Structure formats: structure tokens, C-alpha cells
């Protein structure tokens, strides 16, 4: 019995590639054939190998680490710090120094004030009393105006301490108040209770250093 060819329905299910392969006698059936072995083209391995040889090599990741770029901020900060330090140094160098205050003198301790001694020298006869004030710190004795003698004589002032010996303190002025600076030895004799006396002496005072004329006024020193 003669072999029948493929039916119309089977032939119509062949793809164009299958038809071309069947016409060349290769006996290859593609998808859509219902019978016959499935075989691959004999050159497919060669084409795969050629495609692998011609494919570009995949890039290999580089393990070399690149240095991190330096930030431009820190050099700027360092430069600003240097400028600020230089400016501060200039200010410290050029700024005028504050004037040094002179040393203050040590506070002086004031000497205690000695009591002031006063005497009212009263005339023996008629006349106005003479007021005498002794300043121990200055060593001076001041008297108000006295009219106790005539113009051709002098009125001399004496101090009579506790021992009763008179010591001349000086001659009073004929007009106006009198101020006498005492010698150191006479300052020691001026004390409360001492007597001040006025005598009439030749012009310029007693030549002997002792009273030669009468006592015309006297008074006692007392503290005030």
C-alpha cells in the first residue's frame, strides 16, 4: 500500500521554518507538528559559542579606593582663625596701657589735740582784761590788745610755773593784738594752773631777764 503524505490539516500547522526544513529533506519538525522527532539545527552550538566569544567582557568592579575629596570648608575655617588671632594680637600690642595710679600715701595719723589753755589777765587797777590763748600744737600764745603801760615803757609777759620762778615770754605790742612764739623750754612751763603776769619794764623789756617793775595784771591758765 502506497505511503500517504501528510494530510492537509497537518501540513497547514507547519510553520514556515518547518516547511523550509521539510522541503530540504532535513526532517526537522517545529512547534505545531504532531509527530516526528524534534531535533536542533546542527550549527546551533557553534553559533552559541561564537556569540559567547564575541560578547564583551563584563566590567569588573575596581577595588581600588579613591581618596575622598578634601572639603573646602576646613581650610577656610583655619584661615579665618589665623586672621582673628592676628587681629587680636595687633589689638593687644597697639592698645595703650592703662595709666598706673600713683601709690597712695599712707594715711597720716593725726596727733591728738592738746587741750587749749586760756587765761584772763586782769589789771590790778582800772583797765580792760587781756585774754591770752595758748596753742600747744603750734607753740604760740596770742593776746588781745593791752593798754597797761605808757608809751615810754614796755609791758612784758611772764609765766610763773609751780616753782614760783618767773620766765619772760616776750614784750607786748602797744597797739593791737600780740602773738608770741615760745621757746621750747618755755613751752614746757605752760600748763594748767600756771600764772601769766605783766610787768612794766624799760622799752624793749627787762635787761636782766628778771622782772624789774611792778606787776600790773595777772591771770591763771585753765583748759577749755
Image: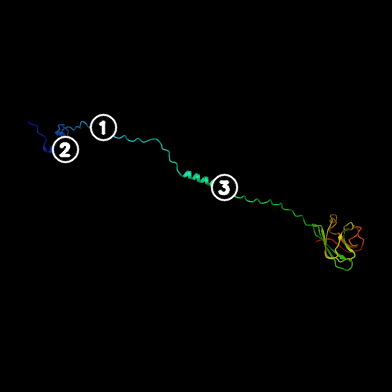
Q: Earlier in the sequence, mark 2 or mark 3?
A: 2
For the residues marked 2 and 1, what is the alpha-carbon distance in whole angstroms? Answer: 26 Å
Q: Residue at x 59, y 49 (%)?
A: 94
Count residues near mark 1 (Cα–Cα under 10 Å), then give few for <14, some for 14-19, many for 20+. Answer: few
Give how far across and how far down residue 70 sits, in percent.
Answer: 45, 41
Secondary structure at badge 1 equals helix
As drawn, 120 above or below 51: below
Task: Point out the image quarter for the N terminus.
Answer: top left
Numbered circle sitting on residue 90: 3
Tell which tag, 2 or 1, sits nearer the viewer.
1
For the residues marked 3 and 1, what is the alpha-carbon distance in whole angstroms? Answer: 80 Å
Give how far across and how far down residue 58 sits, in percent.
Answer: 32, 35
As drawn, 142 above or below 95: below
Count residues near mark 2 (Cα–Cα under 10 Å), then give few for <14, some for 14-19, many for 20+. Answer: few
Count residues near mark 3 (Cα–Cα under 10 Å), then give few for <14, some for 14-19, many for 20+. Answer: few
Task: Point out the image quarter for the C terminus.
Answer: bottom right
Q: Residue furthest left?
A: 1
Numbered circle sitting on residue 50: 1
Q: Residue furthest bottom?
A: 126
Judged left or right of residue 162, residue 13 is: left
Quarter residue 216 falls in: bottom right
Judged left or right of residue 82, residue 199 is: right
As drawn, 32 above or below 181: above
Give how far across and how far down residue 5 sits, in percent.
Answer: 10, 34
Which is more toward the observer, 199 or 53? Answer: 53
Q: Residue at x 26, y 32 (%)?
A: 50
Judged left or right of residue 57, residue 164 is: right
Q: Earlier in the sequence, mark 2 or mark 1?
A: 2
Give how far across and how far down residue 115 sits, in percent.
Answer: 80, 58
Amino acid at each position: 500500500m502506497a505511503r500517504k503524505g501528510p494530510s492537509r490539516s497537518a501540513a497547514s500547522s507547519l510553520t514556515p521554518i518547518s516547511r523550509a526544513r521539510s522541503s530540504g529533506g532535513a526532517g526537522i519538525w517545529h512547534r505545531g507538528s504532531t509527530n516526528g522527532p524534534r531535533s536542533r539545527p546542527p550549527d546551533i552550538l557553534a553559533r552559541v559559542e561564537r556569540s559567547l566569544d564575541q560578547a564583551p567582557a563584563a566590567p569588573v568592579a575596581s577595588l581600588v579606593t579613591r581618596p575622598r575629596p578634601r572639603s573646602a570648608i576646613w581650610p577656610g575655617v583655619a584661615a579665618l582663625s589665623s586672621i582673628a588671632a592676628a587681629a587680636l594680637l595687633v589689638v593687644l600690642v597697639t592698645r595703650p596701657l592703662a595709666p598706673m595710679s600713683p601709690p597712695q600715701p599712707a594715711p597720716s595719723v593725726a596727733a591728738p589735740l592738746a587741750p587749749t589753755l586760756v587765761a584772763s589777765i586782769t589789771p590790778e587797777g582800772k583797765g580792760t582784761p587781756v585774754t591770752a590763748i595758748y596753742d600747744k600744737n603750734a607753740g604760740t600764745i596770742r593776746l588781745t590788745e593791752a593798754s597797761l603801760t605808757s608809751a615810754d615803757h614796755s609791758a612784758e609777759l611772764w609765766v610763773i610755773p609751780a616753782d614760783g620762778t618767773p620766765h619772760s615770754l616776750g614784750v607786748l605790742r602797744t597797739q593791737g593784738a600780740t602773738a608770741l612764739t615760745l621757746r621750747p623750754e618755755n613751752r614746757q612751763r605752760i600748763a594748767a594752773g600756771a600764772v601769766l603776769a605783766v610787768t612794766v619794764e624799760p622799752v624793749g623789756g627787762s635787761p636782766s631777764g628778771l622782772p624789774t617793775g611792778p606787776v600790773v595784771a595777772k591771770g591763771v591758765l585753765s583748759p577749755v
